Image: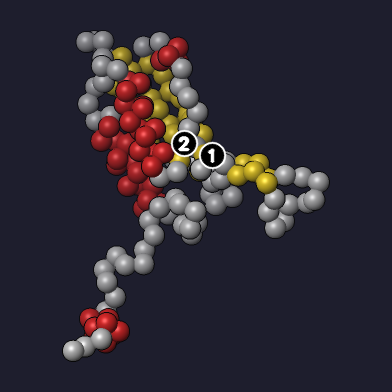
Amino acid sequence: MKKFKQMIAENGPIPGGGQQATFGRYAVGYNPAVVRKINAIIGSYVIEDQMDPYAALTRIRGSLSNLGLSFPAINEDSMVENSGKMSLPLTSYGGRFGKDVDTPHDEFLNDDGISHKIEGGLALHISYEMTETNQCRLRAHIE
């Protein structure tokens, strides 16, 4: 009987094995392919016109929360006009606070947990438009 190491040597590595495609604590840097996949998930929530756009935003919040990403709360008065746009900054695991290797002794590190990996950080961009049937055409993506 062959050993596992012999099987790997003959057949090559397991497809997809060892790849880490998340924004998690152990992810290495910024991966545009991951952002594209997250945008596909977000896009599936807003593909149709919404009767309640806040329900779709709650689903988006939940999915991003599963990945460790969060954005500020949106109040009910933010989408009262017929159309508009907003940009909400994302934080990773609530941001970072404390000391780093390069932090001076009299200062604290306090950021979003993303901007040290990605210049300028990430934001959830939302645009909305009310339709003639009083539904909301909502579009959202991370950039």
Above or below 41: residue 13: below
Q: Amino acid at mark 2?
A: Ser
The structure residue drawn at horizontal position 22% and vertical position 26%, both measured from the top left corner, is: 48
The structure residue drawn at horizontal position 36% and vertical position 27%, both measured from the top left corner, is: 58
- Give the crowd class for mark 1: few <14, some 14-19, many >=20 residues within 10 Å: some
Q: Secondary structure at mark 2?
A: strand
Which of the colour schemes (rainbow, by chain, secondary structure, one colour) is used?
secondary structure
| Residue sticking out furthest to the left | 1
Above or below 101: residue 88: above
Q: Is residue 22 visible?
A: yes
Q: Amino acid at mark 1?
A: Gly
The structure residue drawn at horizontal position 36% and vertical position 53%, both measured from the top left corner, is: 33
The reply to whether the C-beta atoms of the residues labelled 2 and 1 are less than 8 Å apart is yes
Residue 130: which numbered mark, if any? none
| Residue sticking out furthest to the bottom | 1
Q: In x, y percent, where is residue 107? A: 77, 45
- Give the crowd class for mark 2: few <14, some 14-19, many >=20 residues within 10 Å: many
Q: In x, y percent, where is residue 79? A: 41, 15
Question: Residue 86 or 5: which is nearer the viewer?
Answer: 5
Q: Is residue 120 visible?
A: no
Quarter location, residue 19: bottom left
Question: Residue 85 or 69: which is nearer the viewer?
Answer: 69
| Residue sticking out furthest to the front | 1
Above or below 126: residue 102: below
Q: On the image, numbered disc 1 is attached to which residue? A: 94
Viewed as shown, does residue 4 lie left or right of 29?
left
Q: Quadrant of the N terminus?
A: bottom left
Q: Secondary structure at mark 1?
A: loop
Residue 70: which numbered mark, if any? 2
